[in-house]
Amino acid sequence: MNGTADKASRGYATVPQNVDQTPANSTSKKTSAFLKLTSLITLTIQNALLALSLRYGTTRSGDRFFASTAVLMTEIVKFSICLLLVYFEKGSFSKWKNCLYRTVIQNPLDTLRVAVVAILYVVQNNLLYLSAANLDATTNQVTYQLKILTTAVFAVIMMKRRLLALQWMALLVLVIGIVLVQITESTDKIGKNNPDQNRLIGIAAALGSCCLSGFAGIYFEMILKTSDISVWIRNVQLSCLSMPAALVMCFLKDFEKIRDKGFFFGYDLFVIYLVLLQAGGGLIVAVVVKYADNILKGFATSMAIVISAVLSVYLFGFEISLKFVLGAVLVVLSIFIYNMKPVKKDPVIQQDTPKAIADDKV
């Protein structure tokens, strides 16, 4: 019996040898390559723009918006995006409505599982605005890469993951690079001319944000892996809790200011753009993770650091020192090393970057 007949007898689908499958495969590969390239370019631009936009938005002259209200509006936009994605996933309004009712309303205890994550993400996002107001864009962006270390540590502690020796070395290089960036005197004109800017507060806010990002990301990943609920539904549950948490943060942090000046004080087209940019970041990361891999995602992150550094020189008068360049190079190098996969895989050792590093929730 020849090979084709043998496969047919076992129930395998066979393809006639005279049928050319090349065009279909070629089209599929081209589509995949296009989506990969587009998502990576978009992620690179989004990361660079977010760092620069946060810096400008929190230090520009004129009426200053309240960061706590921007965080709340970001959560509302994320909630709307996730609802729309769930609708596309289900395909009809009735299925969409029934799905949301069953998973969010009828299972309140399951929804409350993500309460810790929701609160931590709200605090983290407020810290990001605080660090942006006190650190130049590039220093803030480089320092925030420490979330790779915090996420890895929490993955080892909470999920019993094992990292390669090469990955531990990459984390050490990351820490050295960030320390070099912090001890440098590189800054921008905004920092020099703003007596209210406090570098120590900025560093503390960035480090606190990294710790919260690492713990919340791994905790959320554990929730995703212990249920069959889709990631979009989980993000709807998350937003249902993060919106009230963000509202509480508005009252705790800026109640008197909001009462006197209004919730949307200082809002203009730029602030609206900033909210949309931050809200869309998680969605872009999700696309990158789906169509690309960790090495390419690391490349996008590294390129974003370089782009923001160059643009900061022209936009904010950022002064780059030799120590800063060396530290930034080490951080970029560590990202590549950490996400590098060896040729021979050990099934026991966790090789991929934890999903949470791909970034925070959508």
Image: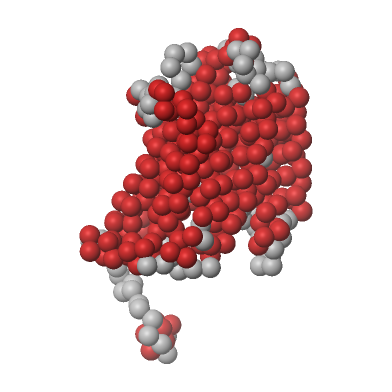
In the rendered image, residue 159, in percent from the top left (x then y), is placed at: 65, 62
The quarter in which the N terminus is drawn is bottom left
Is residue 237 in view?
A: yes
| Front residue (pair 177, 123) | 123
- Residue most toward the top? 193
Is residue 36 in view?
A: no
Say how many tags the image has: 0
- Residue 22 lies, with reference to residue 59, above or below; the image says below
Asked if residue 143 lies left or right of residue 231, the reply is right
In the rendered image, residue 357, in percent from the top left (x then y), is placed at: 58, 48
Q: Residue at x 70, y 58 (%)?
A: 156
Q: Residue at x 74, y 38 (%)?
A: 175
In the rendered image, residue 316, in percent from the top left (x then y), is placed at: 55, 15
Asked if residue 185 lies left or right of residue 124, the reply is right
| Front residue (pair 184, 292) | 184
Q: Residue at x 35, y 77 (%)?
A: 14
- Residue most toward the left? 93
Q: Residue at x 34, y 24 (%)?
A: 269
